[in-house]
Amino acid sequence: MNYDETAQYLTNAIARSGHPMPTIAIVLGSGLGKLGEKIENPLVIPYRDIPHFKASTAVGHKGNLIVGTLSHSATQPLSRPKTVMAMQGRFHYYEGYTMEEVTYPMRVFARMGVRQVLVSNAAGAVNPDFRVGDLMVITDHINFMPNPLVGPNKEDFGPRFPDMTEVYSHRISTIAHEEAKRLGLSLREGVYVAGTGPTYETPAEYRMYRIWGADACGMSTVPEVIVARHSGMEVFGMSVITNQSNDLGNGVVNDGDDVVRAADRAADNMTALFTGIINRL
């Protein structure tokens, strides 16, 4: 894959814009592109213009890479604005892309010197105590997708057998909880299970996930996270709970448009929280 060519294209575009090179990248999931709209002095690069990037076809994914600064509110200003690079939409395995293509941006970011990656997604609640609109800090994951590291190891990115003991940074999770307290937000914590999709889970699958210790489920994130960790980047993950499990006899029917609408309603809280976290990285 042409990681260096893509990285050079983006590096040149950022240099021409006058922004410093970002060391923080954000991946915005279904319906969560609102945070991208809060980025100031934005350089907006459509994926179609980026060499070797794919198109994002999922509902709620705009398909733009945005580079700019995030500022806090007037009551909590940044000492200096942080330059970030945000993916307004991701690539999914269910769209027909290979795992190499799904995770391609992570290795490009690594080539560009990104040190921290903040990933977000819309997820279904497996934990019966969770409600639509909850924000869940991802503490661990269970992977039911093909592992993106299968095949010849890319030695210049990381080792053949990367450790996954601490996939999601305890340091950044602690910052997230401190920022949530300052903002008056309540956070959940939990394990995210990733399946291929595009079908939503059956009642039996929800019950299985719950027995195995999962709190939320979705169709993304984990492949990107595995590659980011393989490449030595620090990772923070957050799920917005946008629908609930349908095995409780509650007549719930999962719908993609409803998921996007629920994510949009929670986007303001997530935007404030991510901005606070980034301020402290």
Image: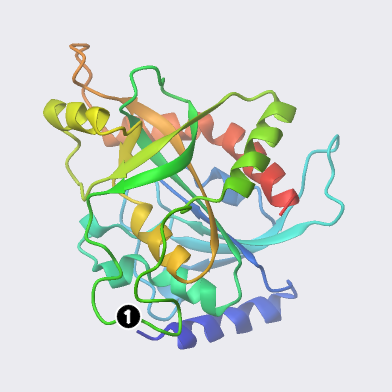
Pick the residue in front: 97 or 118. 118
Pick the residue in front: 223 or 51. 223
- In the rendered image, the quadrant that contains the C terminus is bottom right
Q: Which residue is mark 1?
A: 153
In percent of width and height, residue 268 lies at 60, 34
- In the rendered image, the quadrant that contains the N terminus is bottom left
In percent of width and height, residue 146 lies at 22, 60
Which SS class for mark 1? loop
From where the camera sits, is residue 158 visible? Answer: yes
Q: Residue at x 52, y 31 (%)?
A: 266
Residue 76 position (above or below residue 265): below
In percent of width and height, residue 206 lies at 21, 29
Q: Give the amino acid at mark 1.
A: Asn
Residue 81 position (above or below residue 209): below
From where the camera sits, is residue 31 visible? Answer: no
Residue 270 position (above or below residue 26): above
Residue 263 position (above or below residue 12): above
Q: Residue at x 73, y 71 (%)?
A: 19
